[in-house]
């Protein structure tokens, strides 16, 4: 289908040139070249699939609807029709949603993929300015040419360069911090430059200067990046060289605007910064990257998440009400701790092993501590969590007994393997939380996969296990500093800015202690301390 879209785009582009050769407008042609040729090309380069081979719905939508959107954009120029232009605008909105969906499912950690996502999200601004030009909208006293050139800007610099930068990041193995800095400048510059053009010449010049500097560093990184094919590196390198030449003219132009003594006219810049960029920057880069075909460093999409969602109240009888209980006999949160082969568990304390495999034999005391900055929100949190019957934690910091019960769960309805539920209540018999435990493996690593049903949703914590000193065990959703993994907290398929860790240790006295910590956007807000003993040994302190 991507190949079909590319052919359709070329056919429409040739038809457009044939219909407009007598009144040729270079800026309109540049916009349409991006729409009809470059958009389907980068979609093919950056498309992704789930781990099970299925195609994301939004991916199928943007591919399937492209021919109609491309035809609408072509007809918009041919007939000066704002209605046809709106069709392209709506399609760019779908592409922006596609980019946002990729970002939301993966999170911000992978900077090169974020760069690609940003390119797709910026294109909706190109669709807006395209529609504004065709419809002759009155925006801040901008003339038609400025509206058109703004559309060019968001169909090229704001759309294609972030995507090329993302493809470069997929290959780059060194200078990662420099690359991250350059990437953020590239991603923020289109908005800052647009604001400068609209409101401040000084801001425009400074933003163009920083943007230019970042592109020169980008050119340096191209030279330092290993390619699998020499011709691909030559093409991408040639593209970056031409870009550095044309962007220097942009800086000269911006400086002239600042001094109110323009060195070049806008018409000059259309040819220098427009046509030369399209032919000398975009085309070689697309051919080079098409030959190189850089793949993402990790498949972030299609994680095995629970399909069980709640309705109103969850509570301790949720499984029975929804007919989710299975006859499977579960005595522990896991069948055997040795299944988590990504960590060397030979040194793990036997009591920790026994707790996870024979959880029903243990009793817990817990002390909940909320950070001071979060306390103003506690009343609202407690109100909703109590009525929801899920995640209902006390506001006080006193030690409190927690009772627990393990139940088998219908794995077919859940969608994961060997699922079991751990229902915990406080000493007053009120439901604290119901968690559905499972595990999954990917690339020779096994994760603990814990889902919490919520009203009309499911929140899943994917925890990576680590061995710690003296036979302890750490389970954490925090992303590792080197490499990639599945760890994270997800609401349905959207990665949340939440992190948690569960640090379990034994002191040699037949007693376990654990600390559960949680962060939101990097800020700690909750700590739960646990004392864990076998039921026949447990005595309230």
Image (spheres, grey):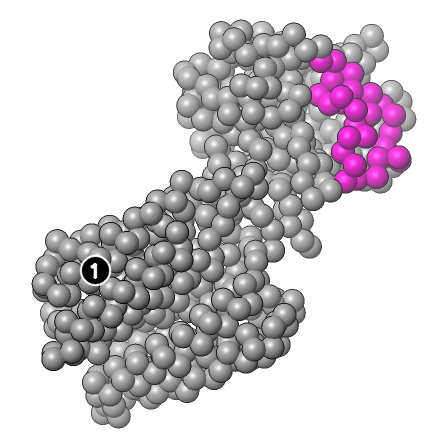
State the image coordinates of residue 427 (x, y, percent, origin top left).
62, 9
Query: Which residue is painted at 18% across and 53% down in the image?
Result: 86
Name the quadrant containing residue 337. top right
Can residue 58 be spotted in the picture?
yes
Name the one closer to the observer, 338 or 472: 338
Name the quadrant containing residue 168. bottom right
State the image coordinates of residue 170 (x, y, percent, origin top left).
57, 62
Task: Name above or below for residue 400 compared with residue 139.
Answer: above
Name the one closer to the observer, 41 or 395: 41
242 lies left or right of 472: left
Can residue 209 be spotted in the picture?
no
Where, quadrant-wise, is the C terminus in this rendering?
top right
Query: Which residue is painted at 60% across and 19% down in the image?
Result: 411
In this rendering, the count of numbered labels is 1
Task: Name above or below for residue 308 compared with residue 115.
Answer: above
Label 1 neighbourhood size at 10 Å, few (<14), some (14-19), many (20+)? many
State the image coordinates of residue 418 (x, y, percent, origin top left).
66, 21
Q: Is residue 64 magenta?
A: no
Secondary structure predominantly adopted by residues drawn in magenta: loop
Name the one closer to the observer, 271 or 157: 271
203 lies left or right of 107: left
Query: What range is drawn magenta here?
Result: 330-358
Q: Which residue is mark 1?
A: 73
Task: Name above or below for residue 114 compared with residue 364.
Answer: below
State the image coordinates of residue 63 (x, y, percent, origin top left).
36, 50
Name the one closer to the observer, 426 or 492: 492
Q: Is residue 348 magenta?
A: yes
Name the quadrant containing residue 365. top right
249 lies left or right of 333: left
Mark 1 residue element:
helix
Query: Which residue is painted at 81% across and 34% down in the image?
Result: 472
Query: Which residue is painted at 40% across and 75% down in the image?
Result: 283
């Amino acid at each position: 289908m991507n190949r079909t879209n590319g052919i359709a785009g070329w056919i429409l582009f040739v038809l457009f040139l044939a219909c407009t050769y007598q009144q040729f407008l270079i800026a309109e042609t540049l916009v349409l070249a991006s729409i009809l040729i470059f958009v389907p090309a980068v979609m093919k380069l950056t498309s992704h699939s789930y781990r099970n081979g299925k195609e994301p719905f939004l991916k199928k939508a943007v591919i399937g609807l492209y021919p109609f959107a491309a035809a609408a954009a072509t007809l918009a120029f041919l007939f000066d029709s704002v209605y046809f232009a709106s069709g392209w605008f709506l399609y760019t909105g779908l592409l922006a949603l596609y980019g946002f969906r990729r970002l939301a499912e993966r999170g911000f950690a992978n900077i090169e993929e974020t760069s690609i996502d940003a390119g797709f999200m910026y294109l909706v601004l190109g669709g807006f300015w395209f529609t504004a030009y065709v419809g002759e909208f009155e925006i801040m006293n901008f003339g038609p040419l400025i509206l058109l050139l703004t559309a060019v800007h968001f169909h090229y610099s704001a759309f294609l360069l972030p995507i090329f930068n993302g493809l470069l990041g997929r290959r780059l193995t060194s200078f990662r911090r420099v690359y991250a800095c350059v990437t953020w400048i590239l991603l923020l510059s289109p908005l800052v430059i647009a604001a400068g053009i609209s409101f401040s010449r000084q801001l425009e010049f400074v933003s163009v200067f920083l943007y230019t500097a970042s592109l020169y560093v980008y050119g340096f990184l191209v030279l330092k990046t290993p390619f699998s094919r020499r011709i691909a590196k030559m093409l991408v390198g040639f593209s970056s060289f031409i870009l550095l030449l044309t962007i220097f003219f942009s800086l000269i132009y911006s400086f002239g605007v600042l001094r109110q003594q323009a060195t070049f006219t806008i018409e000059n810049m259309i040819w220098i910064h427009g046509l030369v960029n399209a032919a000398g920057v975009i085309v070689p880069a697309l051919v080079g990257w098409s030959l190189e075909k850089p793949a993402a460093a990790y498949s972030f999409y299609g994680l095995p998440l629970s399909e069980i969602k709640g309705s109103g109240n969850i509570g301790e009888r949720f499984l029975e009400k929804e007919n989710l209980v299975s006859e499977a006999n579960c005595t522990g949160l896991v069948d055997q701790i040795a299944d988590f082969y990504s960590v060397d568990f030979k040194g793990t304390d036997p009591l920790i092993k026994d707790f996870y495999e024979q959880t029903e034999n243990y009793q817990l005391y817990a002390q909940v501590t909320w950070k001071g900055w979060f306390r103003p929100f506690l009343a609202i949190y407690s109100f909703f969590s109590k009525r929801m019957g899920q995640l209902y934690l006390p506001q006080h910091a006193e030690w409190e007994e927690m009772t627990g019960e393990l139940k088998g769960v219908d794995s077919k309805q859940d969608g994961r393997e060997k699922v079991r539920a751990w229902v915990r209540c406080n000493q007053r018999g009120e439901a604290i939380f119901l968690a559905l435990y499972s595990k999954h493996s990917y690339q020779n690593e096994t994760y603990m996969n814990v889902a919490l049903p919520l009203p009309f949703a499911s929140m899943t914590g994917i925890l990576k296990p680590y061995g710690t000193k003296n036979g302890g065990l750490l389970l954490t959703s925090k992303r590792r500093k080197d490499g990639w993994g599945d760890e994270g907290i997800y609401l349905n398929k959207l990665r949340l800015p939440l992190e948690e860790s569960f640090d379990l240790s034994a002191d040699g006295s037949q007693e376990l202690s654990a600390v559960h910590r949680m962060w939101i956007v990097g800020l700690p807000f909750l700590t739960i301390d646990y004392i864990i003993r076998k039921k026949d040994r447990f005595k309230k302190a």
